[in-house]
Amino acid sequence: MDEPTTSVSRRNFIKGVIAGGATASASGYLFRQNGVLAQRSAPGSVERLVTLNVNGQNRPVDIAHEETLAMTLRYKLGLTGTKLGCDRAECGACTVLVDGRTHYACSILTHMVRGREIKTVEGLEGPNGELHPVQQAVMDEAGFQCAFCAPGFIMSMVALVEDKPGFTRDEAAHALSGHICRCGDYNKILNSAMRAGEIARST
């Protein structure tokens, strides 16, 4: 009597390889602690599982070596207020604060900001729901048209207001010069910045 033969399709073979790789990767995280089964990173490599301080919360996230902060914020942490425009540090739409200073999130690698304080537009609202002076000013002045660029402009305004609330219009223009508004509403944006300074000085 003929014995039954077992055939493995190309699809099933590939699925098995992928599943095996995922299991090996997961076990690497499980046994990363000290001991016989500990897995050490190669010299010069980047830890994939890192913890970021974002908007006052510690957020664990699995990253790739070449992953930018903008990609991590948007696609790993769901903070889509950080926009991706040019993706080459020209438009300013992805601007966030790192230790209180503005940075293009599309041009800084995620692993470079471990241990630093990251703030996105989602983190501006106060604990009781109160708006940041910049958010209030943007509402008062109707500062944006399509508003795609708004989060980046807002984060740079926040840095400006918190560093020097008594700035001049020329200083505001200089501080926001790294941003592009596709609608060309620069005058209203500067009006918003000046209004934000007024609100900050009065509180």
Image: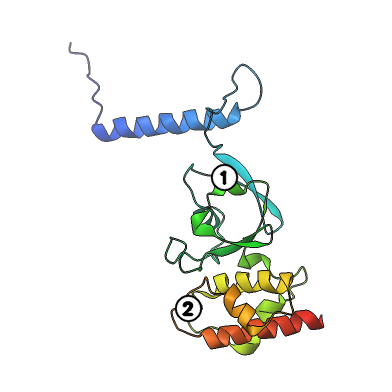
Q: Which residue is mark 1?
A: 111
Q: Residue furthest top?
A: 1
Q: Residue at x 60, y 73 (%)?
A: 175
Question: Does 38 sit above or below residue 136?
Answer: above
Res 74 seen here: no
Q: Earlier in the sequence, mark 2 or mark 1?
A: 1
Mark 2–mark 1 Cα distance, whole angstroms, equals 30 Å
Question: Does 32 sit above or below residue 151?
Answer: above
Q: Residue at x 74, y 75 (%)?
A: 130
Q: Position of residue 37 (x, y in %)?
A: 59, 19
Secondary structure state at the residue bearing disc 2 = loop
The amino acid on which the numbered mark 2 sits, given as a three-letter code, is: Cys
Residues 54 and 30: in front is 54
Q: Position of residue 148 (x, y in %)?
A: 49, 74
Q: Position of residue 12 (x, y in %)?
A: 30, 33
Q: Which residue is mark 2?
A: 181
Q: Is residue 135 left or right of residue 103?
A: right
Quarter assignment of residue 46: top right
Q: Residue furthest left?
A: 2
Q: Residue at x 57, y 32 (%)?
A: 29
Q: Position of residue 5 (x, y in %)?
A: 22, 19
